Image (spheres, grey):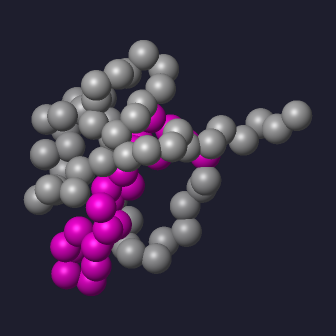
């Protein structure tokens, strides 16, 4: 038996009664965009390449930024 929670397949699927909420933001221009769509999100800004834990959390979005603080990767729930 495993205690690992796996990320659901597909880009904009969500679990736990949060249907029809976005789970990724390819159009992102800043964390305000995410908070407009998902006000309960806990936004974590990290330098690109930072090692993060692998557990899947529907209330967390990692923002990976480059050395100029520009978004370096599409933000996703997790």
- Residue 42 within the segment the image draws in magenta: no
Q: Can residue 61 be seen in this view?
A: no
Place of residue 24 in the rendered image (x, y in percent of width and height, measured from the top left): 30, 48
The one nearer the camera, 6 or 78, is 6
The one nearer the camera, 64 or 15, is 15
Give the left or right position of residue 16, taking residue 68 as reference. Answer: right
- What residue is rendered at 43% in x and 44% in y? 10
User: Which secondary structure is most common in the magenta stretch?
Assistant: loop
Span of residues in magenta:
55-78
Give the left or right position of residue 68, taking residue 6 as reference. Answer: left
Place of residue 60 in the rendered image (x, y in percent of width and height, measured from the top left): 41, 42
Give the left or right position of residue 21, taking residue 54 as reference. Answer: left
- What residue is rendered at 37% in x and 21% in y? 18
Above or below for 77 versus 63: above
- What residue is rendered at 77% in x and 36% in y? 3
Q: Residue lying furthest bottom in this view?
A: 67
Place of residue 61 in the rendered image (x, y in percent of width and height, measured from the top left): 37, 47
Q: Residue lying furthest top in this view?
A: 17
Give the left or right position of residue 56, taking residue 39 as reference. Answer: right
- What residue is rendered at 30% in x and 61% in y? 74
- The number of numbered badges drawn on the structure is 0
Looking at the rendering, which quadrant does residue 21 occupy? Answer: top left
- Residue 71 within the segment the image draws in magenta: yes
Q: Residue lying furthest right in this view?
A: 1
Which quadrant of the rendered structure holds the N terminus?
top right
Above or below for 65 versus 4: below
Q: Can residue 40 be seen in this view?
A: yes
Place of residue 55 in the rendered image (x, y in percent of width and height, measured from the top left): 61, 46
């Amino acid at each position: 038996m495993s205690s690992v929670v796996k990320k659901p397949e597909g880009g904009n699927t969500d679990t736990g009664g949060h249907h029809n909420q976005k789970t990724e933001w390819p159009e992102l221009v800043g964390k305000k965009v995410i908070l407009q769509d998902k006000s309960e999100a806990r936004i974590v800004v990290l330098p690109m390449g930072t090692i993060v834990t692998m557990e899947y959390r529907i209330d967390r979005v990692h923002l990976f930024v480059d050395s100029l603080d520009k978004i370096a990767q599409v933000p996703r729930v997790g």
